[in-house]
Amino acid sequence: MVSDNGGPITIDFVNPIVSFGGFFTYLEPLTLAGFDAADIQVATASSAYSTNDALFGDPGSSPNESLAIHFPSGMVSVTITGGQAGGSFALDDATYRTKVPEPNTLSTILICVIILFLKRKYKTVTTTSEV
């Protein structure tokens, strides 16, 4: 479990992610924001209630509200904001999905060369054994 001691939380990712989510219990309205590599906000989600604490939550609310953001082009950071002073939320079971990397051009060319080499070698062996 993670909480916002001291203020909003920012999570930076080395590789871009396409989604982030978790289960939140909060005492103040909560916002998830995703940012791309240019630090432009590209995704956002807000809590459904002002508070969902088990004892004093808004009517109809319940702890562990699921919140998630998605951006297919990729996010490199996520900021979770509750109360500006912190101490306003707890996050449980955070999940994220990374962007599937595109094949490297050099590795693709290398694989093609190996396949052509093996195909040619197989042809040579077949041709010489028929003679």
Image (spheres, helix red, strand yellow):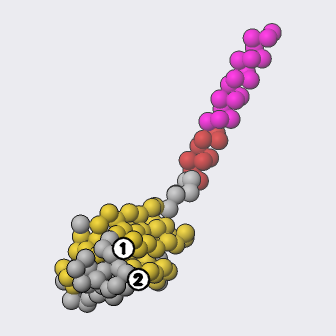
Closer-to-camera residue (11/116):
11
Residue at the limit of the structure toward the front, as seen here: 59
Where residue 61 sits, quadrant-wise, is bottom left
Q: Secondary structure at mark 1?
A: strand
> Percent from the top left, x then y, of residue 98?
46, 61
Closer-to-camera residue (61/102):
61
* 10 w.r.t. 125: above or below: below
Residue identified by numbered label 2? 48
Q: Is residue 127 visible?
A: yes
Q: Residue at x 69, y 23 (%)?
A: 122
Q: Residue at x 38, y 63 (%)?
A: 95
> Percent from the top left, x then y, of residue 108?
60, 47
* 73 w.r.t. 86: above or below: above
> Percent from the top left, x then y, of residue 73?
54, 70
Image check: 122 left or right of 69? right
* 14 w.r.t. 26: above or below: above
Q: Main secondary structure of the magenta part?
A: helix
Residue at the limit of the structure toward the right, as seen here: 131
Instruction: Give amino acid for label 2.
Output: Ala
Instruction: Give amino acid for label 1.
Output: Glu
> Percent from the top left, x then y, of residue 16?
45, 66
Residue identified by numbered label 1? 65
Quadrant (top left, top right, bottom left, bottom right) of the C terminus = top right
Is 30 included in the stretch rendered in magenta? no
What are the residue bounds of the magenta stretch?
114-131
Spatial separation of the CA atoms under disc 2 and disc 1:
8 Å
Is 119 included in the stretch rendered in magenta? yes
